[in-house]
Structures are given as structure tokens and as C-alpha cells.
Image (cartoon, helix red, strand yellow):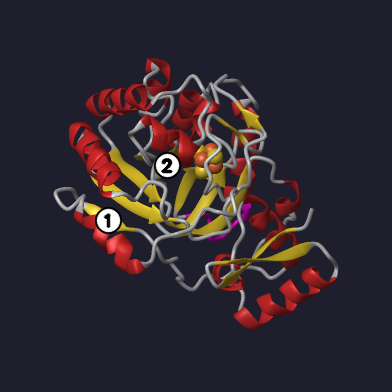
Amino acid sequence: MFTRQYNFFMKFLFGPVPSRRFGRSLGLDVIPAKTCSYDCIYCESGPTTSLSIERQNFVDCSQVLEELGSFMRDSPQGADVFTFSSAGEPTLYEPMGELSAAIKRQYPKIPLIVLTNGSFLWKPEVRRGLLQADRVVPSLDAVTAKCFRKINRPHPSLHPEQIIEGLRAFRKEYKGQLHIEVLLALGVNDSREELCAIAKAIESIKPDKVELNTVVRPPAHAGAKGLNGENMARAAKFFSSFNVEIVGSFHTAAQKSSEENIDQKILETVKRRPCTAEELAASLGVSQERMQIEADKLLGEGRLIRLCFDQKEFLGPAG
Ligand code: SF4
């Protein structure tokens, strides 16, 4: 049972949320919302408000560790994994290496994953800061300059060649699992030419796995559309010489959770990314009926809004 109301006060943690790839993932968020080196058209967290390449110590490691300690003490279910994933780019956090090392010392059995846009791996200090992670998942959505600018809308100082070079260097130094995520948006980076070029770049990086993704939640840019299953399968053929996986459905393992403060938990979860009612029910360990009642209440109070995307209804934060 959640006996404390830490969900009200969690500043640097979120969830655990249902992750399509990792199960019950406790998010670590050490970046101010929408501070990122990219402004991806598909971003689930809305448009970037601070397009930055400046790495900073946004928060003291000790504060994050203290909050993590409270969560792990008070939550009987804990988490399947810890994931650095935020509404911004995690490698902009300067003491990433220091914080990761402290987390691994305290929780050596819980895998630590970093989801990153990969835009700073050409910096040796950023690569060093990621060496403690069990798995690093950088993105590589485009390799031609035109496509890169179209889908990732990066900080003007960033270039695809430099990013690919950084990924190659990281692969040489990093002993953990390196998965490269390629997110495809319909009509943007799914042409034969771009897919061939991405596959060629990935061949030179030699990751353990390629994860093919598409737009499955309400995106920052209304024009960003996902690929259907047939087109994803077609795209996957370009990566058939790698260990490729089309990532797409949520883990829905039954989870028990206190139903206390469920409305706050819903609001905390959708603040990071819109979710369907089914995903929220699975994440928070409540029945779908109970979730529907809570969602209707929050919608009626104007604290949640409905977002339609790809013929599915998501719940997002109001305002
Ligand atoms: S998807 Fe990731 S990299 Fe792209 S804008 Fe959002 S937070 Fe930044």
C-alpha cells in the first residue's frame, strides 16, 4: 500500500508508468520541462520551450537520491527499472555520471536505463556519464541534414554527422546494451533513401538492437502521423541485418496499487505524457471501471482534457 502521499511531492521521479519496452518504469526527471536540444515534431511532451545545448546542474544529486530513497522505502512494488526519461533531454544534466553511479551503488539489481536523443555523445564527458547505465537508448531518426531538421528540429549547432560519430565512439567505450531507436513519421523520414541511409549509419555503429517506433501518442506538431503496421513492417526490412524490433504495445501485467489519491496519480502521470484510460489503469493498478469513474470526474472538473490521436482517445493535463 502507498502509505505516504509522496506522489504529491515527487519532484524528480514519476510513475511508475507503463513502458512499452520496459514494464513498470520509474522515471527519473532531472531536467526542467521541455529543455531540450531538439524540438521533435512527434514529441509527446509538447513543443520545446528552451532549445538548449548548455549542460547544467539543474538539481543536486542528493535531492534526487533522497526522493528515490523515500519511494523505494514506501512503495511495496518498487519498480522494474529506473529510467532517465524526461520532458527534456537527460544528458543536459551535467552530473549524470555521478548520479547514475550513486543509484547503481544503492540499487545494484535494478536496471538503469537512459533514453536520450543522442545529440551530445560526441562529447567525451557525456559518454563517460553514461557508462554506468545498463542500457542506453539513443535516437537516430534521420541522417540527412534536411530530414534531421524536419523531424528533430534541432539546435542550429547540431549536425547529423557529428551525432553519428558520437554514437560510434560511444559504442567503442560502452559495455552495456546499446539500443538505437528510430522513430518514423509518415512522409517525413520513411522514404527509401532515408531508411537506407539510416541503416548504413547504424551498420557503422553496431548497436545490440534497433527499435523501430512511430507516432503513437498526441504529438507536439499536429501534422506528425504514425505509420501503420504494414508500413512499419516494410520499414523493418531495411534493418533486417540487425536485431530489429518494432516496438508498439504496452506491457499490461496486472499490478496492485493503492487506490489512495488516485486522482493525483493520474494527473502526475499525464503531466509527463498523455495516456489512454487503459494505460493509466494498468500503470496505477486499478480496474478499468474505477479508472473511467476517476477520469470522468477529472474531466468534469476541467483538470483533464481528452486528446484524440490515431483514432484513440488519450487523457492529457488541462492548461
Ligand atoms: S522527443 Fe525527446 S528529443 Fe525530441 S523534443 Fe521531445 S524530449 Fe526532446
Q: Quadrant of residue 120?
A: top left
Residue beneath label 1, please? 235
**In the displayed structure image, the side of residue 213 where residue 34 appears, left or right:** right
At a point 42% along the width and 17% down the height, the residue shown is: 125
Q: Counting residues from the N terminus, which is met first, the one under dot 1 or under dot 2?
A: 2
Residue 298 in the image: state x and y as whole percent. 79, 68
The residue drawn where x is 53% and y is 22% is 95
Q: Position of residue 176 (x, y in %)?
A: 28, 37
Picture quarter containing residue 284?
bottom right
Q: Note whether residue 272 is visible.
A: yes
Helix, strand or loop for disc 1: helix
Residue 251 vs residue 111, the one in the foreground: 251
Q: Nearer the viewer, mark 1 or mark 2?
A: 1
Q: Is residue 299 left or right of residue 256?
A: right
Q: Which residue is mark 2?
A: 112
Position above or below: 125 against 39: above
Magenta-drawn segment? 73-79
Give the residue type that dot 2 points to. Answer: Leu
Left/right of residue 95 with respect to residue 241 in the rendered view: right
User: Callout 2: helix, strand or loop?
Assistant: strand
Q: Is residue 256 magenta?
A: no
Pick the residue in front: 35 or 307.
307
- Amino acid residing under circle 1: Ala
- View extreme (bottom): residue: 289
Image: 232 above or below 300: above
